Amino acid sequence: MALAGCERRVFGLSMVRDYRRDIDGLRAVAVLPVVLYHAGLGFGGGYVGVDVFFVISGYLIVGLIHQQMVEERFSFLDFYGRRLRRLYPALFVVFAAVTGWAVWKMLWVDLTGYGQSLLSAVAYVSNIYFYAQTGYFTEDATIKPLLHTWSLAVEEQFYLVAPVLLLPLVRFLSVPGRLTVLAILVVLSFAACVVATGKDQNLTFFLAPFRAWELGLGGLLALAEAGGARARRWFAEGCGIAGLVLIGYAALTFHRYLPFPGWRAAVPCLGAALVILAGTVPGTLSARLLALGPLTFIGKISYPLYLWHWPLIAAVVYGRPAPLSAGEAWGIVGASVVLAALTWRYVEGPVRSGRVLAAPRSLFGAAALASIAAACAGGAILGANGFPGRHAPELVRMVSERGLLDKERWLHDRRHCHFSDLAVLSEDRACIRGAEGVAPSFAFVGDSHADAASPAMFAAAGRAGRAGWSITMPGFIFTPGRWHAGAGDDANVRAVLDFIARHPEIHTVVVSAWWGRARIGDSYRDEPALYVDADYDGSGPAYNPGSFDRSLERLAAALPDREIVLFDDVPASPLLDLKTWVRRYAVTGAEPPPGLSRPEADTQRAAYEPSLQTLAARHANVRYVPVFEGLCGPEVCALFDAQGLPVFRDGDHLSQVGALGLTDAMAAVFEAMPGE
């Protein structure tokens, strides 16, 4: 996010020449959708603003480095001095403020995670850190007040590579040669991004090699401009309007269900490139629009605005299960703008202008001291395990005695069985559980909800003198011909069907899953998902329920000679999460109500239960058995049982205690199961 303009050679100072107001306006177009999207105020695709920023940075930084290298006045020391002046002042003010709030408010286990993220952010590797934190059991993003620094890490990694890459290109190649090499790198990075997004969306979202093409696209513009390429006015006018339309289209019509970045990131990136290109011709309509005062003001404060908005959101929602209200969201937006303006005026401005830390020694010394201080703060947090002594002694004692944050205590002892992937299934290495010395006669198939409930399933099987195959995988939904839009196919489903076909002794297939999320593609915890089949019509999230119902029909048709037993599902909510319950206790100082209201649980059930009941009514080989109904009383689905032991270990997975409490309910399944 470099300054919009060229710079003359004064150490570490942003002395602007040929300032382009339209690029500051484009920054506003980038940052506002991001802020509003995170605040829940529209712009379902507002996250594409980060991609626009990447293109801007690539254009400005590559243009600056290239010009200075051609003129033989480039200095690595001077270049990184400018980066320090641009990035460090606002960033470390935010670090200080957020760290102070975190030490004041965050639960000790959350504060430990914050300390790790602070260390990674100081080292500009937070994109790698947050990628490593992704996965099926990823916690709510609002527990991570520095999550947004991943994009700064990507840019900083680009700043490290760009001068090293450009130096030999400028020395040994002409401008067309430089353009060719950079274009090849852009194409390779884009191709890798497109391919890998279908396999691991988090990988391509966070890691720099899969984002490099976005910065490189801006760099291509800069090199082409340096080579004398100029657009005709009519062409520039069209590019500017088309570019704004592309950015607006992405910000308004994209949504969290879509696999991203992948090829879709090319839409806002191309839009940003076209707008920048249009601005090289003076007086184009797009440039005049972007040069309007309010937009250029937001553009100038866009960096501190981006830094402040996410920690403010995290601070407001921390320790409560409810999302932001509209009033709170707008208040956060307003506060973010005010803080950004003050930071820009009183922190960033003086350092960038050279009024403060003018000498190289003072600049680098201050940056080193700030980095060391932040790293020491992160290290102290980790070394003290989050300072649990900050909390009321009775809270710490209660949590310790009851083991409320000891995840392993509430897991069952056959967790290795929960990874029946393609290799396990093809080699018939899935776990057999239940009665000892008995040949398996059924299969229990599902996702982590099924795995969590498996102690009751196989305890009931043992009581009935039966054994069965345990076939569960993280996120696995046994719905043939239907798959997550980012996965590409239903390979795991076909592998399970092949396994069942090879084992005619399996006369009953019991299926359990997070049906609510599977049917509508959304939940309190996960990023919304789009599930498609071969007939997907491009309708987005609205396609989920229909594809779910059709896939259930395919399941019944795929196993006509087997009995299929469909379980219902557990209620799901942060109100049923042990860590959330403790977090709320720590923030409010009082014991929270332990559970989810029955009406809310019934609403969740209504989202999927009719589909299961309808399938059972249509097919003689399908039974629907609501074994999880007993988890809820007339008014509440309790987090703790009568002895104070947790029924759930997190917001949608049973503890071993909670699962075993359902053994009697599952025993009824075996009473009605066909004989051996």
Image (tube, helix red, strand yellow):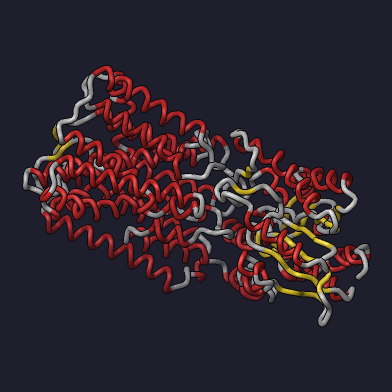
The image quarter in which residue 275 lies: top left
Q: Nearer the viewer, residue 398 or 236?
A: 236
Which residue reaches farthest left? 72
Q: Is residue 79 above or below residue 538?
A: below
Q: From the viewer's perspective, is 634 left or right of 286?
A: right
| Residue in the picture at 25% in, 52% down | 159
Which residue reaches farthest bottom? 437
Q: Nearer the viewer, residue 282 or 367?
A: 282
| Residue in the picture at 44% in, 73% down | 384
Q: Is residue 244 above or below residue 153?
A: above
| Residue in the picture at 18% in, 50% down | 166
Quadrant containing the N terminus is top left
Q: Is residue 549 above or below residue 434?
A: above
Residue 577 x, y percent position in the rendering: 65, 59
Q: Nearer the viewer, residue 543 or 384?
A: 543
How many numbered marks have been drawn onto this rendered protein structure?
0
Q: Nearer the viewer, residue 2 or 213?
A: 213
Residue 334 x, y percent position in the rendering: 43, 35
Visible residue check, residue 592: no
Residue 237 x, y percent position in the rendering: 30, 19
The image quarter in which residue 437 lies: bottom right
Residue 49 x, y percent position in the rendering: 40, 38
Q: Is residue 169 above or below residue 538?
A: below
Quadrant containing the C terminus is bottom right
Q: From the viewer's perspective, is 324 left or right of 510?
A: left
The image quarter in which residue 101 lies: bottom left
